[in-house]
Image (cartoon, grey):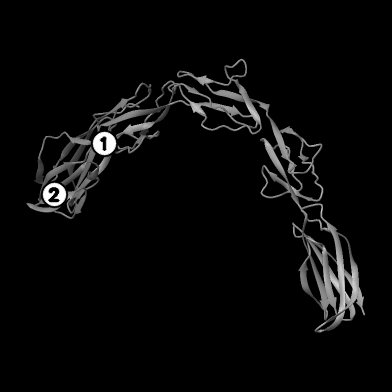
Amino acid sequence: MNIKTKTKFIILIILIIISSCSVVFGRYVVESEKTEFTTINIKTCDFIINNFNRYGTLDLYLDGKKVSTSISSFNRKMTIGTTYEIKNIKVNEGYILETDINSLKGTINNSTTISLSFKTTSYSISYTLNGGNLTGQNKNYTVESENFTLPTPTKAGYDFVGWTGTGLSSATKNVTIKKGSTGNRSYTANWTPTNYNISYNLNGGSISGQKTSYNIESNDFTLPTPTRNGYTFTGWTGTGLSSETKTVTISKGNTGNKTYTANWSVINYTISYNANGGSISGQKTSYNIETASFNLVTPSRTGYSFKGWTGTGLSGATKTVTVSKGSTGNRSYTANWVDDIRPTIHGAWITSGPNYEVRSSGYGYRVNIQVSCSDSGSGINRVLTYYDLNGGWTGETNITGSMTDSFWFKPGYRKIRIVVFDNAGNSSETVISVQCG
């Protein structure tokens, strides 16, 4: 866009007598375009200044008295013969007063003419492209220039981040200089290297620390090694590779998007067992992540019940342990047992008696008994005997060693209770009866 840098503006004041009043039309002319705009209109009864604010302000004196300061427009009823004086013309930024005067004065009559000539200030626009290219840019402008936007520069291998410079607090891609702006301007193009994508097909694996983009300025870097649960990484295939490659380095100066695929082989894991006194058969001793789900075989142990497996991934003894498809890692399991089987009482019988016997408390009958019992688990802990007294059991005696006991009863139908405990706390009991007298 071409911008005129020295457009001139002229204000003309002309007095004309019509009937009983004089009419004065003031106008300024844009010399290059010959366009007229009314700015000052003076009648016998009025002194008018219009639209001077486009160029600046002034101080007005009438008949030697200041009537207004820094005005851009004025309208007051006057009479012919009134003296006027315009002082202290202050021109707006962007314009230059070409008329070589400090003040304007005279008497309002039918031949008054005031002429002021202005031109626009030309401002420069400079560009620092930092290695880029730019076309169609404006190198100067004026306050009268229509809005225009800085064109976008280009630089091979780089993305334009934005302009910094006059009036900008940060890099800005779209910079518009609006009509009415002033001042020389300087702008700097900012760039960032073009990023190329690196995409990964991990085939079910995972990766961390990988670069997903790079540019021509990036230093050499090596693709990290991916991982996949249950598999061993055998190498990358993809951009620029002819076969599976474990170590892939992208050197500084490379360009273009890149794609890589991870390749894997399955890992076989071991399963070990501690039967803990028991026995097991048909168990799996190895598996891999692709093995179909299977349950651990239930072991056995004479005299004990299987409480469950403890070991890999178990928080407590678990009877049914399933190794699901997709599981990984070496595994170790221990069988746990519980003696929850009651001891066996093979028999309890009277070996002698009842025999009549006299005591100080009276007469009664002596009875001797024998107990036979066993436990195939944790073993016998104790054997207790009781006798019935008035509907309740009393006289607890531990006969574990001899497995025999002796009782003295008063005449009547009597009962003897035998309770056998194993070392796990399980118990069995029996009751035998005897008629005394």
Amino acid on which disc 2 is placed: Leu
Looking at the image, residue 306 sits to the left or right of residue 430; the answer is: left
Q: Residue at x 80, y 46 (%)?
A: 301
Residue 129 in the image: state x and y as whole percent: 34, 24
Residue count near mark 1 (Cα–Cα under 10 Å), binned few <14, some 14–19, many ≥20: many
Q: Earlier in the sequence, mark 1 or mark 2?
A: 2
Amino acid on which disc 1 is placed: Thr
Callout 1 touching callout 2 (CB < 8 Å): no
Q: Dot 2 corresponds to which residue?
A: 60
The answer to whether one can see residue 63 in this image is no
Q: Dot 1 corresponds to which residue?
A: 182
Q: Residue at x 79, y 43 (%)?
A: 299
Q: Is residue 415 above or below residue 425?
A: below
- Which quadrant holds residue 422? bottom right
Select label 1 or label 2 by which is in front: 1
Judged from the image, the secondary structure of the residue bearing numbered disc 1 is loop
